[in-house]
Every structure is written in structure tokens, then in C-alpha cells.
Image: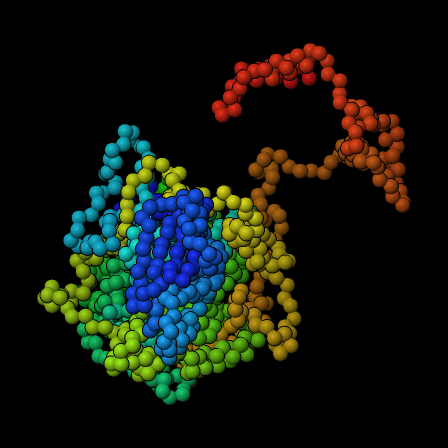
């Protein structure tokens, strides 16, 4: 897009602080950070005597291991020690600060040579010494509320890869340097395609190192890191994302292809199901999640990005009445679609055009419910499109999944047609050595009411179509179409179901109800009971626990900051009637914005880059400098990935662990080993669901779940599960069980190698039997209880065979060995060789080993 020069390589800077040790004394906290090898150290000192502010002193110099040991020896006593893998930041409630450290981590995925970790445990250390006076009564309550955000679940980070950005953005070339850059006013860097780089040869390689500028929308500890914003070494700032990251593998006849699914949950307008609906005035929508599907086979990479989010308008549901489906109401009339325009303009800036809205909200209802927001979305798109060029206008696709499924239609096939159209319009990112890069321009945005059950199924349908094209680009498929029930699709289905369960728990309070199997009509009877239990779980969570959960999110993200002031605006968070003003801050328009017409809702800079992403075309980085060696530790991704400096069990390495996941989706009994062909298994008798107690709709690590707002007033989506019993036998009987043999899987040997295997002649068989019998005699022979006629014939052939060892080694054993006799001539040659001077630090030459070579020739 902005760099087609293969001789210019950009390397992300690997964090120089991957291990942290906290030394705690009465007056100070000392944070010692080191690299992965523990050869380079940095030091932070924190004064514990100050209550109202956090003084952090940073040693500007890089220290050695000897200097660190000497410094720690000067502390005296026995300071409390805590080992960690990173600093999440500092938080203050009413009295003093707390330090949050990552004490346990686990590698969960890798993108190329970049490792991705998930947080497994954290520790919260009080920085300031407690005073003698009585502590504030609300301090402990705020602390417990803050700790309700379980940092051990679904929080991810990387020391070398920017998880807040897509693979396509991370592979783009920088155009601006500095976090405070204005791309509309500042001058960009020179064009990399024509830059000479002051090199002597035309094709000489040039390496640059850069520090990425993260997208704050997806950094969940951004508020916690504000106390460290003035730190000189930015490697102290460990930014974490929230959502879902998982990686699996496809075994294509022994060749492993990794599939990674990354979901980034937005921090803007974040909250729980009924408390965060629609959008705020800045265009931030509820339950906004960016999902990226990355496929790699080593050097080649392919990715596709899609997103989900609530309908971008001001709507809500009144939860004061204890009903399963509160009525939907529009809170604010927006005739000029200003809120949707801010949301869509941001999508054009980050993803380019076209923006495709896949709307799964119901359109026809006996009593208006979901159709209210569906109509609002259609009107907004129609109005805003009048001010866009025809070839860059937004596209709206409406698909009522529940109605189509109840009508007997094949929902997955219909979604597959929509997905194919989407992929053809947006394309995808593809990078391979020696080939031209491909880019994704635009994005598909899927929504229903909750953006949970139906949305996840639609995203899987798109992901399945995308995976076919990705494998086609990588050269593993002739056709981009993938079959259900194949190992490849089963793997992807499990990834998306776990992806949907995780996001549903974070936003809705329960796991999914209507899974992919539900719309495929392959769910078992036991799923109905699980659906009911998940429906009750979600209803209980939305009614009783979502308010407390919303308070925790507002406190963790910094939307609410506790204060000792007794002013009305500083009352405790649990006494506030609403958090509306936390998420809907009004910004007065500038002088230029006041003159700007409402119809000009897309910036000139964004329109100039379409259909490409303005964010990627004008990529901003914090730092950029040229390096003269690709083996520097700060950019050496190979050493950071393999960690050859320490002993590692093969079973503990992430690449080995992921490669074994391919075996998880293979059935025990199978007729072929292709991951792309449908695996036909023996049909088993269905058991009573009350006896089994298991649900076939559960994903790898979760059970099935339910949604109450995903249903129609007259006929709910739960009918999909009950209708399965009538149709499953017909579908199973319609499967064509073609016989699969070796000839159908592989071409004949004569066609490939020019020869053909035939039955051996009688003479050759006799020779082979004689050879086998010789092998048995060499191994001590075998005895059998009964001799067959064939064994008698073989014994006749062996009568004249006398096997003797080729050499006589005497009676040597492990107890005593008699050295062999060497003649004087051989000893003289060996002594001559030993006297030859050699330099072991250089490559040996043939002349130096000539004497030894002559000696070997005489043996």
C-alpha cells in the first residue's frame, strides 16, 4: 500500500523489559526490570511516603547484573520480593496508590515469531504506607469493586506485537513519527518506494526499527498507565487487550497451517447487556468487538478483519420491569444521523471502503420490537450515502435468520452466499515472499439486537468462506469452498463457538444459546435443557449482577474517579442513578467545525485515501530509526521466539502445543485423512438426554447458552432445537457414503514414477524367504510350537548356509577390553598428525588433515 520496496524491512521493537522484580522497603518500592536473558537491567524507584501523588524516579542508565547486585546489597535487611512479568499500572481510590503486577502468564498463540501471552494471575501491592488515622470507610469497597474485573480471564499482551492493531496495519510502512502527529497538517516521511537510503548497491537491504503507536480504544489498562506516562523508557508500559485470543492448527497431510482468531473488545461505551445499548454522542457503540482471522504456514500470512457492534443510534431498553424482553425505545431523535456519521466515519478511517452492514435484526413482527432499530439503521445509511461517491457508498444487507430457519430454508447456505459476496468486495490481506501483497479494503459489520448469538453464527459463516479463500491463496486448495463436518471446518467452528461464548459471558452474563449447530439443525436433544439453563443464567445476570459489574467496568477504565469531596457530582458510584454522563461527554465544536456543514461528514483526508484505509496509508509510529544489523536484540524476533538461551521442553513450546491441536478434531474411525473432505462416521444410537447429561452443542471449553432477546414474539428461536428431532434422520440418510479407496485419494504409481507394483514370482519369493530366515538366524533364531509346511521348505533351503561374523573381536565385554595391536607405521602417521599446529577458531583446511586422510585410506 505504502511500501512496495522489498529491500526495505521494518522490524517492531521487542520490549527490553520482560521480567520485573519488586523490592519493597518501608519507605520505597524498587522495580528492577530486565530483558528475557536477564543481561540488561533498568531501575524504577517509588517514594511510599507521599499520599496525594506518586513520585516515580527512573534511572536513565542501563545497568549490568553486577551493578544491580551491588545496588540490592546496599538496601540492607530483607526486603520483600515479588517476581513478575510486567507492570499493569497504578490505581488510586481514596487513600494512596496500588501497584498491579502480572505474576503468572501463559503463551496462548504466536503470529509469525511474535508470542502472545494471556494473564493467569496478578498481584495488587499497596504503594503508600497506611496512616494511623481511621481509613476511609469506602476505600475497601472501591478496592473490592475494582477487583471484580478478573484480570486472570481473557486479558492478553505481547512484548513484540501490537495486539491493538490488525496484521495489515502492523505490516504497513510508517509515514509519520511521533504520538502527537497531525496527519492533516504535518509533513509525512519520504516515499519508501523511491528512497535511496544512502546505500551503495541498488538491491542492498535496509533495516528499520519502529515502536508502534497502539490504538487506545482497545487498551484496557490505559487509565492505569497514566501515572507512568512520563517514563522515559516506554518498555515499562505493558498494554493489555481484552476479548478473546486462540489458535489452532490444520494438518494438511503433515503440513501444519495455523489459524489464529483474535477478538478485541472496545473500551469506549463498554458495559453490560441492557445497561449499554446503541451508541453515545461520539459514535462509540455498545459491544463493539473487532475480530481478526489470521492464517499462516510459516513465511506466508493471510488475514481478514470483521467487526460486531450495536446499532449506532440512541436507543435503550427499560429494565425496571422484570420482563425477559424489555421494550425497545428510541431516546433521542437524530434526523441528520450525526451519531451514526461519527461511527461510520471512524470505520472509513480505519478500514476503508466499502462498509458492509449485515443486519440480522428482525424486520417483520406482529408487535414492533426489533424492527424499530432496524428501520432507524436503514434510514441513517440511506441519508448518509447521499453525501458519498457512488463507488464508496455503504452497503446494507438485511437477513432475518430466525424467519429463514423456521421457514425450512438452509440458513448456512444463504449466509455462505452473502459471505462470498462480502469477501469479493472487501478482499483480504495476503503477504508472501516474492509475490505482490493484497490488501483488505473495507469491512463487514454484523449486528443484531445483542450482537451475540445470531451475530456469532453469521461471523462464522463469513470466517468459513474467508478460510477457504485463505487456503486457496496459500496453495492448499483448488476451490475456495469448504465442506461442513470436515476437520478444517470443525476446527474453525469450535474456535468461533468458544469466541462467541467468551464475548457473550463478558457482555451478556451467560454463554451462547443458539449456536452454529442450532442453525445447521444438527443440535442434539440435550441442548434444549442447556438452552433453558443459559436463558435463566442470562436473565439472572442482567437483573441482579449487571449493575455491580457496570460499576466495576467504569471504575477500572477510569470513567469514574473516586473523590473525598462531598459535592453532588462526586457522590459514590453506587449512589448514582445513571452513568449516562460518564459515557456521553459533550465536546464543544471548534471554530472550524462550526463552519463545517453537517453533510460533509467524512474528512477530506479520509476521502482522499478511499478505498484504502487512511489509518494504514498514513501510519503513525512513536519511534523510527535505522539499524545496521538484523541480529540486534531489540529486533531479533528469532531469538525472542525460540529462546535458545534456556532449556525448554518441546511439549512446553507453543508451536508444538498448537500442532497437536490438529489431532483434536480427527475422529477415531475415519475413511480418509484429508482435512477438507467430509468425515462420514458410523451413526450411533441416540441416548436418552436425561441419562447422558451432555450437550452436543457445547464448544471445546464451554456449554451451550441462551438469549432471550434473540426470539420473535410469536415464534421463538428455541423452536429451532425442537424441530431438529424430525429432520436429523432425513439428513443423515441423505448422506452419500461413497467408498473411498487408495486409488481415489492418490494417483496411480505408474503415472507418477513410471513403474507398477505386481505380485512377486515364485523364484523371487523363495529368495525373499531365504533372506528373512537369514535375518532370524542372525538375531538368535526363532522357535515355534508347530511347524507349517512352508517353514519346512525354508529349513531345507537353509541347510547349506553357515553364518559367521565378519570380524573376531575376542572376548571383550563391558568389564574388560583388550586394546588392538597397532603397527609402527600407523603409529608414526598418527603422531605426525598430532604434531600439526591447528587453530580451532578458524575453518580447517584440507592440507592440515592430509595426514589423517592418508591414514584413513590405508585402513
Observer-nearest residue: 833 or 665?
833
Residue 304 visible in the shown view: no
Q: Residue furthest bottom?
A: 321
Q: Is residue 365 left or right of residue 758?
A: left
Q: Is residue 485 left or right of residue 186?
A: right
Residue drawn at point x = 52 percent, y = 45 percent = 646
What colouring method underlies this structural image? rainbow
- Quadrant where the C terminus sits is top right
The answer, for residue 205, to whether it is visible in the render is yes
- Residue 720, compared with residue 75, is above or below; it is below
Q: Nearer the viewer, residue 634 or 38?
A: 38
Q: Nearer the viewer, residue 699 or 544?
A: 544
In the rendered image, which quarter is residue 632 located in? Answer: top left
- Identified at 29% across, 40% down, the residue is 626
Position of residue 785 relative to residue 551, above or below, is above
Q: Quadrant of residue 100?
A: bottom left
Q: Indicate left or right for 97 with 738 as reference.
A: left
Q: How many marks?
A: 0
**Residue 638: x, y in percent?**
44, 43
Residue 134: percent from left, percent from top: 37, 78
Which residue does the image show at 66% across and 12% down from the upper left?
Answer: 828
Of 713 and 566, the residue lying toward us = 566
Vertical placement of residue 235 versus 141, above or below? above
User: Residue 58's x, y, as percent?
Assistant: 32, 53
Q: In the image, residue 858 lies at what x, y percent?
A: 67, 14
Q: Residue at x 21, y 76 (%)?
A: 334
Amino acid at each position: 500500500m505504502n511500501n512496495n520496496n522489498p529491500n526495505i524491512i521494518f522490524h517492531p521493537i521487542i520490549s527490553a523489559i520482560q521480567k520485573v522484580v519488586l523490592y519493597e522497603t518501608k519507605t520505597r518500592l524498587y522495580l528492577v526490570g530486565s530483558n528475557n536473558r536477564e543481561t540488561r537491567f533498568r531501575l524504577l524507584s517509588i517514594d511510599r511516603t507521599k499520599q496525594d501523588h506518586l513520585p516515580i524516579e527512573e534511572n536513565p542508565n542501563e545497568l549490568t547484573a553486577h551493578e544491580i547486585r551491588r545496588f540490592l546489597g546496599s538496601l540492607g535487611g530483607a526486603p520483600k520480593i515479588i517476581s513478575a512479568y510486567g507492570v499493569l499500572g497504578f490505581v488510586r481510590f481514596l487513600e494512596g496508590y496500588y501497584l498491579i503486577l502480572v505474576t503468572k502468564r501463559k503463551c496462548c498463540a504466536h503470529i509469525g515469531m511474535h508470542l502472545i501471552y494471556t494473564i493467569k494471575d496478578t498481584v495488587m501491592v499497596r504503594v503508600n504506607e497506611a496512616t494511623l488515622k481511621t481509613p476511609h470507610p469506602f476505600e475497601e469497597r472501591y478496592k473490592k469493586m475494582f477487583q471484580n474485573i478478573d484480570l486472570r480471564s481473557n486479558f492478553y499482551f505481547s512484548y513484540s506485537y501490537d495486539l491493538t492493531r490488525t496484521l495489515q496495519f502492523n505490516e504497513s510502512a510508517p509515514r509519520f513519527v511521533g504520538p502527537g502527529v497531525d496527519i492533516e497538517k504535518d509533513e509525512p516521511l519520504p516515499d519508501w518506494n523511491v528512497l535511496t537510503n544512502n546505500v551503495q548497491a541498488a538491491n542492498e537491504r535496509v533495516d528499520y526499527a519502529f515502536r508502534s503507536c497502539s490504538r487506545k480504544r482497545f487498551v484496557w489498562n490505559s487509565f492505569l498507565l497514566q501515572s507512568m506516562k512520563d517514563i522515559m523508557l516506554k518498555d515499562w508500559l505493558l498494554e493489555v487487550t481484552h476479548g478473546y485470543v486462540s489458535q489452532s492448527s490444520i494438518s494438511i497431510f503433515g503440513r501444519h497451517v495455523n489459524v489464529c482468531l483474535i477478538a478485541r473488545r472496545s473500551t469506549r461505551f463498554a458495559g453490560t447487556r441492557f445497561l449499554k445499548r446503541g451508541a453515545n454522542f461520539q459514535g462509540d457503540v455498545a459491544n463493539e468487538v473487532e475480530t481478526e482471522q489470521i492464517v499462516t504456514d510459516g513465511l506466508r500470512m493471510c488475514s481478514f478483519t470483521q467487526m460486531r457492534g450495536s446499532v449506532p443510534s440512541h436507543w435503550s431498553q427499560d429494565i425496571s420491569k422484570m420482563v425477559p424482553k424489555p421494550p425497545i425505545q428510541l431516546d433521542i431523535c437524530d434526523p441528520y444521523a450525526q451519531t451514526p456519521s461519527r461511527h461510520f466515519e471512524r470505520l472509513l478511517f480505519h478500514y476503508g471502503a466499502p462498509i458492509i452492514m449485515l443486519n440480522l435484526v428482525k424486520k417483520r413482527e406482529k408487535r414492533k420490537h426489533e424492527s424499530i432499530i432496524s428501520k432507524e439503521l436503514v434510514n441513517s445509511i440511506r441519508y448518509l450515502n447521499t453525501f458519498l461517491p457512488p463507488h464508496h457508498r455503504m452497503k446494507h444487507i438485511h437477513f432475518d435468520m430466525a424467519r429463514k430457519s423456521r421457514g425450512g430454508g438452509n440458513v448456512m447456505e444463504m449466509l455462505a452466499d452473502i459471505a462470498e459476496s462480502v469477501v469479493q468486495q472487501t478482499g483480504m490481506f495476503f503477504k508472501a515472499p516474492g509475490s505482490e501483497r493484497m490488501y483488505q479494503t473495507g469491512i463487514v459489520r454484523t449486528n443484531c439486537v445483542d450482537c451475540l448469538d445470531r451475530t456469532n453464527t453469521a461471523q462464522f459463516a463469513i470466517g468459513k468462506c474467508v478460510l477457504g479463500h485463505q487456503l486457496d491463496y496459500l496453495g492448499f486448495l483448488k476451490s475456495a469452498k469448504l465442506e461442513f463436518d470436515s476437520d478444517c471446518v470443525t476446527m474453525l467452528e469450535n474456535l468461533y463457538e468458544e469466541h462467541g461464548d467468551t464475548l457473550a459471558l463478558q457482555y451478556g452474563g451467560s454463554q451462547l444459546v443458539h449456536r452454529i449447530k442450532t442453525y445447521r439443525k444438527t443440535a442434539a436433544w440435550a441442548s434444549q435443557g442447556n438452552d433453558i439453563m443459559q436463558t435463566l443464567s442470562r436473565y439472572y445476570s442482567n437483573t441482579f449482577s449487571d449493575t455491580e459489574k457496570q460499576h466495576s467496568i467504569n471504575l477500572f477504565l477510569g470513567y469514574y474517579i473516586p473523590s473525598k469531596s462531598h459535592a453532588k457530582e462526586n457522590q459514590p458510584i453506587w449512589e448514582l442513578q445513571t452513568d449516562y454522563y460518564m459515557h456521553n461527554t459533550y465536546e464543544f465544536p471548534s471554530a472550524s467545525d462550526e463552519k463545517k456543514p453537517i453533510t460533509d461528514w467524512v474528512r477530506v483526508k479520509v476521502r482522499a485515501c478511499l478505498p484504502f484505509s487512511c489509518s494504514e496509508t498514513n501510519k503513525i509510529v512513536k519511534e523510527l530509526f535505522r539499524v545496521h544489523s538484523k541480529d540486534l536484540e531489540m529486533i531479533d524476533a528469532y531469538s525472542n521466539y525460540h529462546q535458545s538461551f534456556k532449556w525448554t521442553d518441546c511439549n512446553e513450546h507453543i508451536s508444538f502445543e498448537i500442532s497437536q491441536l490438529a489431532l483434536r478434531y480427527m475422529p477415531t474411525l475415519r475413511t480418509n485423512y484429508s482435512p477438507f473432505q467430509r468425515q462420514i462416521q458410523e451413526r450411533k444410537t441416540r441416548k436418552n438426554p436425561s441419562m447422558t447429561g451432555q450437550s452436543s452443542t457445547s464448544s471445546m471449553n464451554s456449554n451451550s447458552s441462551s438469549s432471550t432477546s434473540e426470539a420473535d414474539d410469536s415464534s421463538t428461536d428455541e423452536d429451532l432445537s425442537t424441530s431438529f428431532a424430525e429432520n436429523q434422520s432425513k439428513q443423515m440418510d441423505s448422506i452419500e457414503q461413497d467408498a473411498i479407496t487408495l486409488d481415489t485419494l492418490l494417483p496411480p504409481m505408474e503415472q507418477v514414477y513410471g513403474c507398477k507394483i505386481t505380485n512377486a514370482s515364485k523364484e523371487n519369493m523363495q529368495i525373499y524367504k531365504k533372506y528373512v530366515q537369514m535375518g532370524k538366524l542372525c538375531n538368535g533364531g526363532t522357535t515355534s510350537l508347530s511347524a507349517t509346511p512352508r517353514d519346512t521348505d525354508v529349513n531345507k533351503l537353509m541347510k547349506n548356509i553357515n553364518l559367521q561374523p565378519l570380524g573376531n573381536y575376542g572376548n571383550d565385554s563391558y568389564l574388560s577390553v583388550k586394546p588392538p595391536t597397532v603397527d609402527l607405521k600407523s603409529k608414526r602417521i598418527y603422531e605426525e598428525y598430532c604434531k600439526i599446529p591447528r587453530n580451532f577458531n578458524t575453518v580447517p583446511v584440507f592440507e592440515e588433515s592430509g595426514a589423517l586422510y592418508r591414514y584413513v585410506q590405508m585402513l
